[in-house]
Image (tube, helix red, strand yellow):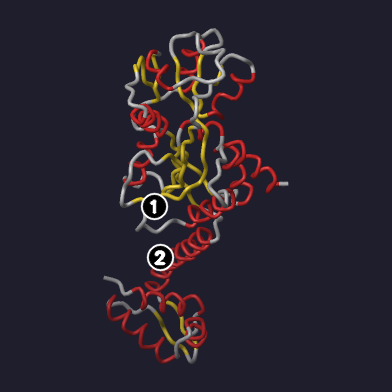
Amino acid sequence: MINFNQLRVFYHAARYQNYTVASKKLCITQPAVTAQVKLFEDHCNLRLFKKKGRKVYLTDQGKTLYEYAKKVFEYEKEIDDVIEDMRELKLGMLRLGTTKTYARYFMPYLISGFHEIYPKIKIHLDEGSSLDMIHSLLDFRNEIAIIARAEDNQDICFTPFSQEELVFLVAPGHRLAQKKSVVFKELVEEPVIMKETGSGTRKLVSELFARNDCVPDVLMETSNAEFIKQLVQRGEGVSFLVREAVVPELREGKLLAVPIHGQKIFLDVSIAYLKDQHLSPPARAFLDILGTLAPADMSPKGIGALMAKMLVKRK
């Protein structure tokens, strides 16, 4: 097996055809260059240099070997450059996971802001339920996830990031639509269209029913918020969704958000990543940006407030 230290000495001696220059480039003594070249020749069982006075010349075998060595150390330089680019965030991949709501309404703004600072970093955005994204961290498919805390896991660090208001939605013609507020017991009579098992919204709504000693009449469950909105608009059932996901429908009167008496419902959203795993430079840079957006207190601040904060920072 080739000794790469000896190959390196041979390469520099061959490149400059001068042991003194090679020793200066390698920061070693000239006798050390001579000794390493001799050891390399012995290993190869070939004569690689001829000497004439103070100058050295490559033999034909030395010329052939030099062409291969040159390729090796050219690749070494490329590898050094790639490593430096990755350190300086001029090259790399950022793998993110988030919920479908955040993927649609928040991540485009956040990713655009990140790309303005780090244009060479490629981003892979994965979306799914909060539980799916927790598993994506554990499986090393993603490094960072912005999700609800769908389940506790001792291997994952959850840092509070925002709070999203959850609203109770009905169609404009629904019997509860004209009420100023509803008592929770009234919801028991309504067919509920639920988010899928594993979503933070589903977990929070299920806990809400349990705290009020009620069992929801689940008509359907789906991960598709747009499908839920259409069903509720048609009067097929009622549902709970993050307010930011229904802003256009509320503004246009296609859906109504009816307050629940004595209760405001907020979904806690966290930044999640593995506790004992080293984060890549792009992931650390992304965390730094998220840190500038997270509220200093935990007063309810959702997607709208986060986007407004981003726009102020970009001006």
Q: As drawn, is 219 to the left or to the right of 21?
A: left
Label 2 vs label 1, nearer the camera = 1
Q: Classify mark 1: helix, strand or loop.
A: strand
Q: Amino acid at mark 2?
A: Tyr
Q: Position of residue 119 (x, y in %)?
A: 60, 48
- The spot of residue 263 in percent (x, y) is 48, 30
Residue behind mark 2 = 68
* Of the pair 47 and 25, the residue shown nearer to us: 25
Q: Residue at x 42, y 31 (%)?
A: 201
Relative vertical location of residue 283 with respect to residue 135 in this rendering, above or below: below
Q: Residues within 10 Å of mark 1 (few under 14, many from 20)?
A: some
Residue 279 position within the rendered picture, expressed as x and y whole percent measured from the top left: 43, 56
Measured Cα–Cα span from mark 2 to mark 1: 49 Å
Image-quadrant location for residue 10: bottom left
Residue with the mark numbered 1: 157
Report the side of 151 relative to 309 (left or right).
left
Residue, x 39% and y 52% (percent of image)? 157
